[in-house]
Image (cartoon, rainbow, N blue to C red):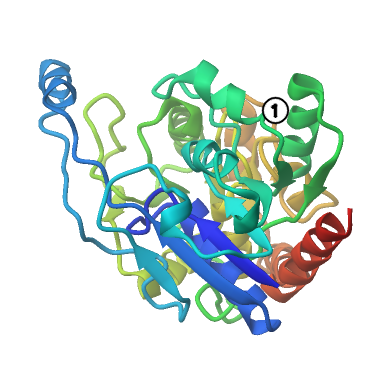
Amino acid sequence: MKITFVMANWKSLAGGVQSTGDLAYHLQKRGHEVYMVSPQKRRPSGLQQVKSLLKGKGLIPWKRTGPSHLDNLDLPRRILDHPPPVTDADIPDADIVIATWWETAEWVANLSPSKGAKVYMIRHHETHDYLPKERVAATYRLPLHKIVISQWLVDVMDKEYGDQNVSLVPNSVDFKKYYAEPRKKQTVPTVGMLYSPLYWKGCDISLKAFALASEQIPNLKLVCFGTKPPVPELPLPPRSEFFCQPPQDQIKDIYASCDAWLFGSRFEGFGRPILEAMACRTPVIGVPSGAAPELLSDGIGILVKPEDPEEMAEAIVKICQMSQEQWGQMSERAYTKAISYTWDDAALLCEQVLEKLLRS
């Protein structure tokens, strides 16, 4: 098949961009002709810059180039010489054309039939406060076949948009990039988390849980990383270790430096850090958001109630007080679960979905 992926922004370190690239690469490995296209990033308007300054956030950073999860993937791609939208003139005729973000769904919906059967790869329910909610929601009603990455998104598309014809193709991770050798617990009890000031990421829940657990484990250490430095509104505890946009080959070491990884997202399309941490043999304590219910059940991790830092703190204490043997068994269960489903598996599932779509 000839398959075109329409991206909103090639130059990005977002997890969704990484997952899209990994899936496209493994479809290419299966013999499909894959092509990726992205418009130039749109420069922030003067009004947007003024609003950002008035909110005390400073100027919105803008540059045409920057690091991307896709830089090291051998994928045919084109960054257009113009800002959005992507139109017929920008992409080749193909069998399938895949939107990968709500804006790209609008563009793909307007493409000619010659550009391929239209698919919407949905990696989150993007009705966030900082986005045009009604416009985003409208994209989920477009006549595009939906591929989603978690059972939660299958349920959302059914209950909120009345679409029961949705295909599930879960994420995997690159096990050459995320891995660790078997190990013992840390000398100093250590938990980790992905840091983001976005409310729906739930870092405030994880930080509160850490503070509560520290009352029982005074030498408890926090390790975290993020794409931007911590903000005053969401400070890190004293003696925390924070890595800002660490090199990609360092992230596995961050995961492997922890006895447990905290996942507090209020809602999430999938929750890649869960799987990344597990691939690095780090047990995960998480709320039932995104793919957490599927990934952390049956003693593989610890699921806690949403908005309940007290229960998350209890789970932290439980893991930190495990014997080496108990922790090692939990670590091994997490690793075994993580490697049980690969990007090759995901590519095969996706291939089957696309072939069925072409036959219909």
Identified at 43% across, 28% down, the residue is 204
Position of the N terminus by quadrant: bottom right
Residue 344 in the image: above or below residue 104: below
Q: Position of residue 222 (x, y in %)?
A: 39, 48
Q: Residues within 10 Å of mark 1 (few under 14, many from 20)?
A: some
Relative image position of residue 172 (x, y in whole percent):
66, 64
Q: Quadrant of residue 51?
A: top left
Residue picked out by circle 1 = 305
Q: Tell me if 139 is positioned left or right of 58 in this view.
A: right
Q: Is residue 313 above or below residue 56?
A: below
Q: Quadrant of residue 306?
A: top right
Position above or below: 223 against 106? below
Q: Residue at x 35, y 43 (%)?
A: 84
Q: Nearer the viewer, residue 292 or 47?
A: 47
Q: Residue at 77% x, 67% y: name it.
A: 351
Residue 190 in view of the camera: no
The answer to which of 175 and 38 lies nearer the viewer is 38
Q: Is residue 118 above or below residue 245?
A: above
- Residue at the spot x=23%, y=44% of the render? 229
Residue 80: image location, x then y, percent: 31, 59
Please indicate, yes or no, whether residue 104 appears anywhere in the rendered image.
yes
32 horizontally vs 61: left or right: right
The amino acid pointed to by label 1 is Lys
Q: Residue 188 appears at what percent x and percent y?
A: 43, 60
The count of marks equals 1
Relative to the observer, which residue lies in front, 123 or 322?
A: 123
Q: Identify the element where label 1 is drawn.
A: loop
Of the pair 202 and 322, the residue shown nearer to us: 202
